[in-house]
Image (cartoon, coloured by chain):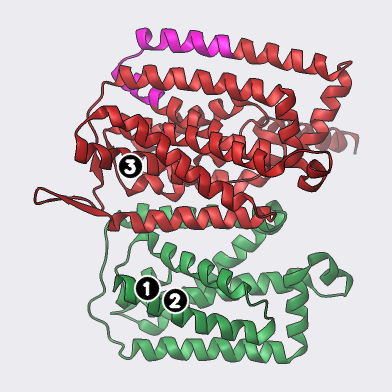
Amino acid sequence: MREMEEVKEIKVVSSYREYVKRERKFIFIEFSILTFLFIIIPSISGFYLLWLVTLGIIYSIYTLAWNCMETMLGRTSLGHAIPFGLAGYLSAIVFLYTQNSIFLPVAWIFAGIASALLLFMLSLSKDRIAFVFITFLIGAAIWILSPLLTLTKEGSIYGGEEGFSLPPVQVSTVYGIAALMLLASFLFFGIFRTSLTGLKFKTVRDDEKAAKIVGVKVSRVKAFCSLISAVIAALAGGLYSLHFSHVSPEVFSVHIALFPFIATVFFRNSEIGGIAGSFILVFASNYLNSIFPQLYLLLYAALLILSPLMRRGGLIRLLIRQRSLKREERVKTKEG
Amino acid sequence: MGAYFAYYTLESNVALGVVAAIITAFFLGAILYLLIKKIGNGIFEATIISLGFAIGLEETLRIIHGKGYYLIVESTITDWEAMQALLLVVLLSSIFAAYSSRIGIRIKFVEDDEFLAKIYGVNYDKYSFLCITLTSSAIALLGFLSSTSQALYPGIGWIPLIAGIIIAAFTALFRSVGFMHYGKIVLLSFAYSSLVALLFG
């Protein structure tokens, strides 16, 4: 479906170069709008709204990182909570022993590289369904086992169900770092998707065998995508734990693992779609939580059930299709 | 869900609780089957729909009961372990009977290839429906029977689910079919349980 749409789009323009030019124009317009929004938001929003927007930005980075595996490799990972959570856990443990915040980014990158190795090894199997299952399984197993992790320092026990603490950081600081990181990721993925290298990568997504035949080094592509995706997800996870100044086993939860999958069902095929989906989920979850604690998980459940329908055409297309079907029915009944 | 039925009925009416758990699970399985049939296409989408359905049920339980843990400390029924063993024997006997009859080959067709199964005249929808609903009922009954051995909380199903996937994945390595496959599942389940007890017991 997605390939057909891309081919259709390419046919409309006279050449691929023109298509890339048009796509990049959109990316730069979207980038400018995002930059403008991120500059004015701190001055017009109160503390809580800024806190919520920061959370939305962190989740958006996470979704973009996850999306890289799907759009470039055609691998749906249900285990991206591993780099996300591992970065939080590792940085908290490093902070517990060193009491120095300077090592936090090092811990995030280390967690990203370790997770990338795991994702790369799993992606070597040609079975894409098995990849979904195994990533989900490993992520869920870590979620269940993580409360067992306890550390003792100077007679006090840390970890377990409660998790670990991190140094308190001002919301505006986390907001600034997260916004810069999101803008950088947005630009990187947007340009990369429309570049010749990106096109080469997409051949792996469409057909690994065919990609090998035309000379694409499939394993290298897999290694690169796994690394980029896991490291950016780890950076998002590190910022997430810093945002809450705390990390608990919930950071590995199935809900975190499923978040990017659900966030991308609203609008397909673009970076801005992933960001919009993440913000919709964060704000909707916040509203539902105010009605009843954890009510947002029912929304997640409903979206997961409807996701096959939505992913085939995106929410907007699905609504338009339903409306046109209703209109057709109305016309038919009138004619009848 | 089966364990929560036990929580409500163990002291009043066990038989009613068992029957209610089985029937409710059957109907929930039927809803899941309909959702997969109407929305899903292939294993991946069926898995995602099942996951969404499971999270929906879990959150419904959480909304009703809160985040608390419940422990059933007293029950009117003894020999729970013997009943679980009996359930295993009944399940294995049913599978053996199914694979010894003409139904066995039909189930194999349904399991391997939907398209081929339909070409050969197997009622694919009927067997899919029965597989989902009957296994849902069996799992609810197992949840009911094992409710006294662990704390009850909405996410109680995650550990058996993960254990089930691990055991199924390892059994798939043997590439066996039919009743033998289920026999190996039982053996690996015992091995897995012993290993978990050894590591975390």
Q: Can the viewer see residue A308 in this picture?
A: yes
Local secondary structure at mark 2: helix
Residue drawn at point x = 36 percent, y = 82 percent = B14
Residue range highlighted in magenta: A31-54
Relative vertical location of residue A53 with respect to residue A237 in this rendering, above or below = above
Q: Are marks 2 and 1 on the same chain?
A: yes
- Chain A in the picture: what colour? red
Name the residue carrying label 2.
B192
Local secondary structure at mark 1: helix
Alpha-carbon span between mark 2 and mark 1: 6 Å
Horizontally, is A127 left or right of B61 in the view?
right
Q: Which mark is residue B196?
A: 1
Alpha-carbon span between mark 3 and mark 1: 26 Å
Q: Residue A296 carries which label?
A: none
- Chain B in the picture: what colour? green
Horizontally, is A141 left or right of A75 in the view?
left
Residue drawn at point x = 84 percent, y = 29 percent = A7
